[in-house]
Amino acid sequence: MAPEQPTNPDNQPIVPRPESSGSDGKQRESSAHPVEIPQSLIDPDMPMVKHVAGIAESNSRALGGGTQTALVLGMLYQLQHELTESKRESRERGLKVDELNTRLTTTLVSEASLKAQVRFERDHRNTRALLLTIGGASFAMAIEVLKVEPSLAVGLGLIAVVCFVCGWIGVPRSKSE
């Protein structure tokens, strides 16, 4: 006995019974025209699209016929195209990020160097002022002593010159700073 079919409120079957089961060997070949895919649409980097296009060209009913095959192939092509574009954009953004990282590193190194120079100048500002003061005082004393003791005046003059040079040019920086 056949299973009972579901019915609607009017007692009519919801799903009609097929006239043929399709397994009796009397099937006919489809009259649908084979789907032809332009080769320009098939990118070798798109293997899924290539395989589906091959199935469509073989006029297989596995994908449901011509219209469904064209629709599935169109959707796959669109998705593959979007994937390719996303990968390209990702590569471009990666290169831009690398460039910006390089520029950031260069800027940070430059900033650290400038901060070290400012810190050195700030730390040694008093030393330079002291050297200029000692140089001025030595020079003044050398002039006063020149009349009495010329050899002492020359020594004080040399001390004054060394103090002026170090005060104006600056104290040489050590390698560790």
Image (tube, helix red, strand yellow):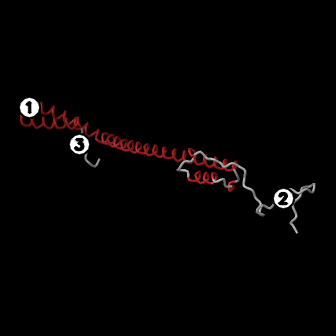
Comparing labels 1 and 3, the label whose residue is closer to the camera: 3
Q: Residue at x 44, y 43 (%)?
A: 100
Q: Position of residue 66 (x, y in %)?
A: 69, 49
Q: Position of residue 119 (x, y in %)?
A: 33, 42
Graded by Cα atoms within 10 Å as few (under 14), some (14 to 19) or many (20 or more), the crowding at tag 1 reads some
Q: Which mark is residue 146?
A: 1
Asked if the residues shown at circle 1 and circle 3 are in contact, with their CB atoms under 8 angstroms apart, the answer is no
What amino acid type should be assigned to the residue bearing mark 3?
Pro
What amino acid type should be assigned to the residue bearing mark 1?
Leu
Looking at the image, tell me whether mark 1 or mark 2 is earlier in sequence order: 2
Q: Nearer the viewer, residue 103 or 55?
A: 55
Graded by Cα atoms within 10 Å as few (under 14), some (14 to 19) or many (20 or more), the crowding at tag 2 reads few
Looking at the image, tell me whether mark 3 or mark 2 is earlier in sequence order: 2
Q: Which mark is residue 64?
A: none
Q: Nearer the viewer, residue 113 or 57?
A: 57
Name the quadrant containing residue 25. bottom right
What amino acid type should be assigned to the residue bearing mark 2?
Glu
Residue 67 in the figure: left or right of residue 19: left
Q: Residue at x 26, y 40 (%)?
A: 127
Graded by Cα atoms within 10 Å as few (under 14), some (14 to 19) or many (20 or more), the crowding at tag 3 reads few
Q: Disc 3 designates what residue?
A: 172
Asked if the residues shown at circle 1 and circle 2 are in contact, with their CB atoms under 8 angstroms apart, the answer is no
Q: How many marks?
A: 3
Disc 2 is placed on an element classified as loop
Q: Disc 2 designates what residue?
A: 19
Q: Position of residue 129 (x, y in %)?
A: 26, 36
Name the quadrant containing residue 148. top left
Disc 3 is placed on an element classified as loop
Residue 150 in the figure: left or right of residue 117: left
Q: How much space separates mark 1 and mark 3, taking CA atoms?
A: 31 Å
Q: How much space separates mark 1 and mark 2, taking CA atoms?
A: 135 Å
